[in-house]
Each structure stands twice: as structure tokens, then as C-alpha cells.
């Protein structure tokens, strides 16, 4: 007994000594890695957060710096991050030298606990395999029709009744929350054939949605730290935000496992959803869980973010809203509901308004890669091996040299030629990324956004409760407005 006690005391002593030594050593590495000698204004401003005096969003400050840079490229030395808003550089990174700019290990470590080996977090063969499977599924017309029907059902059964229930009642509704619930239900139905019912009229608390939100927020916050050492120590000691992250991921895992189990019980061989397709060729439960989580992330927050800023912009620009109404009246006549998928392709003005809205408010505001080898970007910027290279869709959408002097105005007309929508180069407008890893859900997302826009604009006037307040974003993997988007709803007679 005594021997056991002595052994356990010695073990505890050794464990704590090791932890303290490790923490001390890590702190030393952190201080050295911070490059305190970098006294440039940008780094000082980042470290002291003094940029907050002039800008309410980090991406607005970056946009300002990118606009001032003659090359459209800036450096945040303390983060080892080169940020560019130069379309030639973006094409070079995403297409020409794709192999030299993978997601890289630092990124996959930051998001690894949440995303595991899911498509967003891997390079090489594992990425190729998932991309091939998912693009086969998402690329076919029949699948888009299936998505169209699912979205229409969610609109008819849940979104419209919910908006009608608050219409004209002087009641403030958080539209961002409603849209997140809407897109969560859709992506779950589409990807897994299961309906979480988040947009039921009593707005139930969804454990998986809440755990998922917290996990993606805390994972994204890891990337904001000047050194990974801090969160790694916290993770090792299971402290603070890392403790919360671990708990949230545990819940996500449990619920994802339940989804896989349910799908198995229901049978998957004849189903149309993505999970069933993957289940026919993958037996590894952990891998299936990672795929599920990646698709939730891909399809939920992005669409909700895009629609939230779309309705904010419409409420600031009523002339755009009435031009959309005119187009809908012309194409749909007196029909309240869109009956044919093909009619969407004739709505050029609506398509232009949606693209224009994501130019100013891209759901993915920036995206980083890591250089495999030393390189020189087309604008002459030297990139050393291991550097984080970030392209910045938010900044790019607001660059005068790309979009002209009216770049900050919301003008769908800039996308139209003779009344027809004309797309832009994905490297000038990398909202869905571009090159070899271009978004696989782009067409589906556009269908979903158009269906919501049509249904809501034809039936309601949405007015933002505080129209003078510009969106302020919370740190996260996708753009999320702090405090949501409080709106008032009126039904059109
Ligand atoms: C407005 C909505 C959307 C936007 C703005 C958007 C944007 C993006 C961006 C920027 C990426 C690149 C991310 C990276 O590599 O780091 C991406 C990748 C991806 N997106 Fe989307 N997305 C949207 C909706 C969707 C939807 C609805 C789905 C699926 C149902 C989807 C599926 C994917 C997948 C699977 C990838 C990974 C592609 C790869 O790595 O090869 N996206 N998306």
C-alpha cells in the first residue's frame, strides 16, 4: 500500500514538474517566435489592437492596408502571413502553382480536432478521393433538382410560416439566426437524408448546431494567436477555451456518430444523400464523421452568411429590391411559388444582385495556404518556404483597382451586359475560391439563395431594426454578424 502511495506521489510530482518545464519552454519559444524585434507599424498595430480605433472589423483594416499597397500585397510579420488582393497572385496560388500552395500542416493542425481528415482539411490523395466522390454527387443536374425540391419544401413548410407569424407585429426577429437554422436543416437533409428540424416554429435549441457553432468559433480563434504554442499548452492542460473546444467537439462527434448509425439503420444503398454515397465505399466510422462535419461547415454557415448580408444590403438599397421585384413579376406573373428550376436561369438581375452582395460581403472573408518551397509571386513578392499566404476576397471586393471608383457601392448592374448576367474571373472574384479546389457547392448554394430571395421578396418587406449600424463581424471561419441581424417583417398584400 505504502509503496503504491509513494509511486503515485512520485508520478504526480514528475507529471507536474514536466508540465511546468514544458510550459516554461513553450513560453520561451513563443516569445522568440513573436519576433518582438518587428517594430513595423502594421505589426505593432496588430499586437496592440490599435487598429480598432479606426476600424470596427479586422477585414476592414486589412482592406485599407491592401488598398494602400502598390502591389496589393501586405505582410503581417508577427503572424508570418503574406496577404494579397492581387488577382494575378491569386491565380498563381490557386491554379498555376497549385502544388506549391497546399492547405499545409499549420492549417490542418489548427482545424484538425474539429475537421479531422474531412475534405477541407486535407491535401494529396485523401483530398482527391473526397473531391472526386463529392463532385460526382454535387455536379449532376438531378442532384441540383433534388436540392431545389428540398429547399422549396423547407421554405414552404417552415420559413414562410415563421416569417408570417411575426409579420406586422412590431416583433424583432434575428434574421441571421433564422437563416442559419434554415441552411442547417437543408444541408443536413441534402447531405445525410436526415431532418434536424431547427426551423420548426418554436425555434428549438439544437444541440448539434450549438456545439458546432462553438467548435468552429473556438477553432478559428486559434488562428488569430500570434503563436500556436499558447493554444497547444492550453489544450495539453485542458484549460479555458481549449477545454470548451474539447467538450463541443465531443458533442459534435457523438451526434455525428448517431447520424451514421441512423443512416445505417434506415439503409443507405438506394439513397440520394452524400453520406449514403460515401458509406457504400467507406467503412471507417471516424472518416465518415470527418466527412459529415466538413459538409456541415461547407454548406451551412456560408449560405446563411451570404443571405444575411444580402438582406442587409437590400434594406439599405430599396431600389435594388424593387428591381428584383419587377424581374420576378415579369417572369413569374402572379404565381407565388417558383414551379420550375429552369426559370431561375432567366433571372439575370437577381443573379447579379446575389453576386454583387457577396462581392462586398463574401461568406469566406479570407483563405490561407502554406508555401511548400521558396517562390516569387507575379507581383514580385518573395515567399519563403513555410510562409502562410492568404488571399482576401473581402479586401478584393473593395479594391478600386479591380472594381473601379464605385467599388464600395452595391450595384448589381455592374454584372449585366445587355440585361444578361456575365460572370467574372474567379481570380478577381474568389468568393467560391477558384482553380483546382474551387467550391463544389457553388451552384447548389446559388440555387438555395435564389429560392429564399424569391420567396421572401415576393411576400415580405424585411426592414433592419437599426439601419445605420453596419455589420460587425465576430472572428470565425465564415462571416458571422455579431449580435445577429434584428429585423422587422411586414407582409405585402
Ligand atoms: C454561398 C455559399 C458558399 C460559399 C461562398 C462557398 C465558398 C467556398 C470556398 C471559399 C471554398 C474554399 C475553401 C478552402 O479551400 O479553404 C469552398 C470549398 C468547398 N465548398 Fe463551398 N461555399 C459555399 C457553399 C457550399 C455548399 C452549399 C456546399 C455543399 C453542399 C459547399 C461545398 C464545398 C466543398 C466540398 C468545398 C471543398 C472543395 C475542395 O477542397 O476541393 N460549399 N467553398
Image (spheres, rainbow, N blue to C red):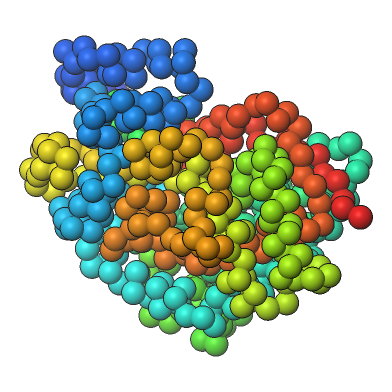
Q: Is residue 392 left or right of residue 275?
A: left
* Quarter the N terminus occupies: top left
Q: Is residue 228 above or below residue 343?
A: above
Foreground residue, 259 or 56?
56
Task: Return the x and y of residue 312 as percentages of the image width and height.
Answer: 65, 40
Task: Return the x and y of residue 9 as percentages of the image width and height.
Answer: 31, 25
Q: Is residue 337 left or right of residue 105?
A: right
- Which residue corresponds to the image point at 28% horizontal and 38% vertical from the top-left? 84
* Residue farthest toward the left in the current orientation of the protein: 374
Residue 450 picture quarter: bottom right
Task: Return the x and y of residue 309 as percentages of the image width and height.
Answer: 60, 43
Task: Return the x and y of residue 324 as percentages of the image width and height.
Answer: 68, 56
- Which residue corresponds to the image point at 25% horizontal and 53% vertical from the top-left? 91
Q: Is residue 256 left or right of residue 86?
A: right
Q: Is residue 151 above or below residue 75?
A: below
Residue 346 picture quarter: bottom right
Can residue 433 be seen in the rendering of this structure?
no
- Which residue corresponds to the image point at 68% horizontal and 26% vertical from the top-left? 468
> Quarter for ligand 1?
bottom left
* Quarter the C terminus occupies: bottom right
Can residue 425 be seen in the rendering of this structure?
yes
Amino acid at each position: 500500500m505504502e509503496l503504491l502511495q509513494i509511486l503515485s506521489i512520485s508520478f504526480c510530482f514528475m507529471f507536474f514538474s514536466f508540465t511546468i518545464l514544458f510550459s516554461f519552454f513553450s513560453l520561451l519559444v513563443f516569445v522568440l517566435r513573436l519576433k518582438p524585434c518587428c517594430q513595423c507599424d502594421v505589426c505593432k498595430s496588430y499586437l496592440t489592437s490599435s487598429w480598432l480605433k479606426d476600424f470596427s472589423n479586422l477585414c476592414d483594416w486589412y482592406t485599407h492596408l491592401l488598398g494602400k499597397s502598390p502591389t496589393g500585397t501586405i505582410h503581417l510579420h508577427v503572424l508570418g502571413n503574406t496577404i494579397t488582393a492581387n488577382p494575378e497572385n491569386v491565380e498563381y496560388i490557386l491554379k498555376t502553382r497549385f502544388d506549391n500552395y497546399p492547405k499545409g500542416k499549420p492549417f490542418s493542425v489548427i482545424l484538425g480536432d474539429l475537421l479531422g481528415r474531412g475534405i477541407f482539411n486535407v491535401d494529396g490523395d485523401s483530398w482527391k478521393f473526397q473531391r472526386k466522390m463529392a463532385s460526382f454527387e454535387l455536379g449532376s443536374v438531378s442532384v441540383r433538382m433534388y436540392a431545389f425540391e428540398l429547399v422549396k419544401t423547407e421554405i414552404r413548410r417552415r420559413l414562410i410560416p415563421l416569417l408570417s407569424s411575426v409579420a406586422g407585429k412590431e416583433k424583432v426577429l434575428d434574421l441571421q439566426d433564422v437563416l442559419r437554422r434554415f441552411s442547417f436543416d437543408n444541408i443536413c437533409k441534402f447531405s445525410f437524408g436526415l431532418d434536424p428540424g431547427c426551423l420548426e416554429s418554436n425555434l428549438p435549441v439544437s444541440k448539434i448546431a450549438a456545439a458546432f457553432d462553438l467548435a468552429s468559433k473556438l477553432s478559428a480563434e486559434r488562428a488569430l494567436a500570434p503563436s500556436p504554442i499558447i493554444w497547444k499548452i492550453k489544450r495539453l492542460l485542458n484549460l479555458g477555451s481549449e477545454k470548451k473546444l474539447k467538450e463541443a467537439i465531443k458533442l459534435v462527434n457523438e451526434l455525428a456518430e448517431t447520424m451514421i448509425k441512423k443512416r445505417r439503420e434506415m439503409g443507405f444503398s438506394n439513397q440520394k444523400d452524400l453520406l449514403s454515397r460515401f458509406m457504400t465505399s467507406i467503412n471507417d466510422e471516424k472518416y465518415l464523421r470527418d466527412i459529415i462535419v466538413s459538409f456541415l461547415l461547407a454548406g451551412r454557415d456560408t449560405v446563411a452568411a451570404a443571405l444575411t448580408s444580402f438582406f442587409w444590403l437590400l434594406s439599405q438599397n430599396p431600389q435594388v429590391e424593387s428591381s428584383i421585384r419587377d424581374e420576378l413579376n415579369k417572369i413569374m406573373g402572379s404565381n407565388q411559388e417558383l414551379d420550375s428550376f429552369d426559370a431561375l436561369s432567366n433571372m439575370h438581375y437577381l443573379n447579379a444582385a446575389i453576386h454583387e452582395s457577396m462581392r462586398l460581403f463574401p461568406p469566406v472573408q479570407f483563405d490561407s495556404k502554406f508555401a511548400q518551397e521558396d517562390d516569387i509571386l507575379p507581383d514580385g513578392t518573395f515567399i519563403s518556404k513555410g510562409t502562410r499566404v492568404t488571399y482576401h476576397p473581402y479586401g478584393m471586393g473593395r479594391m478600386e483597382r479591380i472594381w473601379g471608383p464605385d467599388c464600395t457601392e452595391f450595384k448589381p448592374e455592374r454584372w449585366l451586359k445587355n440585361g444578361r448576367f456575365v460572370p467574372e474571373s474567379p481570380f478577381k472574384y474568389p468568393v467560391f475560391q477558384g482553380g483546382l479546389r474551387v467550391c463544389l457547392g457553388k451552384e447548389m448554394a446559388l440555387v438555395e439563395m435564389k429560392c429564399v430571395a424569391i420567396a421572401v421578396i415576393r411576400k415580405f418587406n424585411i426592414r433592419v431594426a437599426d439601419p445605420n449600424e453596419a455589420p460587425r463581424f465576430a472572428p470565425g471561419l465564415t462571416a458571422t454578424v455579431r449580435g445577429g441581424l434584428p429585423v422587422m417583417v411586414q407582409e405585402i398584400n
